Image (cartoon, helix red, strand yellow):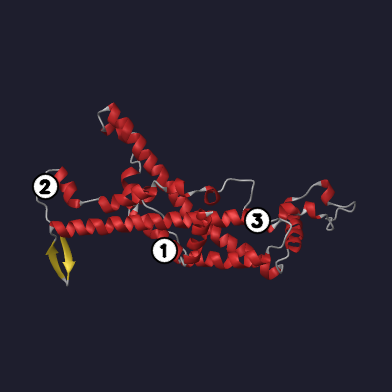
Amino acid sequence: MSKYSSVKKYEFFEQIEHDSTLAFFFNKVFKNMDLARIISSPKSFNESSYLKSRKKRKKYNNDTYKMFYQTCLFEMYAHAVIKKLEDWQKIIHEYLSEFNGSWEYYARSKRIDMINKYGGDDDDYDDNGNIVKNVPDDKLLSYSIILDLIPDDWRDIVIETKPDDLEYISRYISLNSSFSIKDMAKSIGFENLKTYRMQNGVMVENTEDDELLHSIENTTKSENATVMLLTICMIINQFVKEINTLQKDEDNKEFLSVLLSRIQNLFDMDIKSEITKLQIELEK
């Protein structure tokens, strides 16, 4: 393998290494978007110089650069979703098992940990330099588990992404389904190129009906993948919405116990109950 082969790594999606059905689904979407990434990934600083027309060059730049940028954003989003759900599971499990679902116990412990790690304000220490432990609840709110689940002080692609932000994905997934070797061959002068499929161990020539059926099947698969992707995004948005309604100075033990199960169901893509919840929300 060439020592420069790593340069082409960005032409392909980085697979998510996680043992879950959700990760498997994202990896399948990556595969269906391979063509979009390959044709849009930049090959040089001035690849547009191959296009003679300034108007065509401008349109080529805008379309392909936008496609590459958006596929990179989606790749980042998919990886971040898995990481976010894992983090939520870890935080909630720790909260329920080690702190018995007590917001105050959790917040006091996290406050001391943060002061020990990063230091505190003057009023966090007594005259002997020891950390003041008995502080009022209002000083504990910023250490609540709610803010560990959804921090309010930095940008987060998982928290901020809405289904509308992912609608472009359907176009890029469908590129694979609409790609035809025969059409490509015709564009360069090969009018009667034959294509084949394996059937019962024998190569059989495809008829026009076979190719049409294959195209329809691929289009249906890409549409289903898009619907599922948007549904997953809506479910995560619903998680965020519900977490944001929680009071920081309450235990919320029952809700978080249920949320832990719902997150695992999302990993398993067992989402019928979540879809029902979304339908109820939409009807309100």
Q: Which part of the image, by quadrant, shows the C terminus?
A: bottom right
Q: Is residue 244 visible?
A: yes
Mark sitting earlier along the chain (1/3): 1
Q: Which part of the image, by quadrant, shows the N terminus?
A: bottom left
Q: Amino acid at mark 2?
A: Phe
The residue lying at 34 percent from left, 35 percent from top is 61
- Cα–Cα span, label 3 and label 2: 60 Å
Element under label 1? helix
Extreme residue in the right direction = 127
Extreme residue in the top direction = 54
Which residue is label 1 attached to? 24
The picture places residue 93, in percent across and down from the top left corner, at 63, 67
Which residue is label 2 attached to? 190
Q: Nearer the viewer, mark 3 or mark 2?
A: 3
Q: Is residue 195 visible?
A: no
Residue 41 occupies quadrant: top left
Nearest to the observer: residue 5 or residue 23 = 23
Looking at the image, residue 17 lies above or below residue 161: below
Label at residue 148: 3
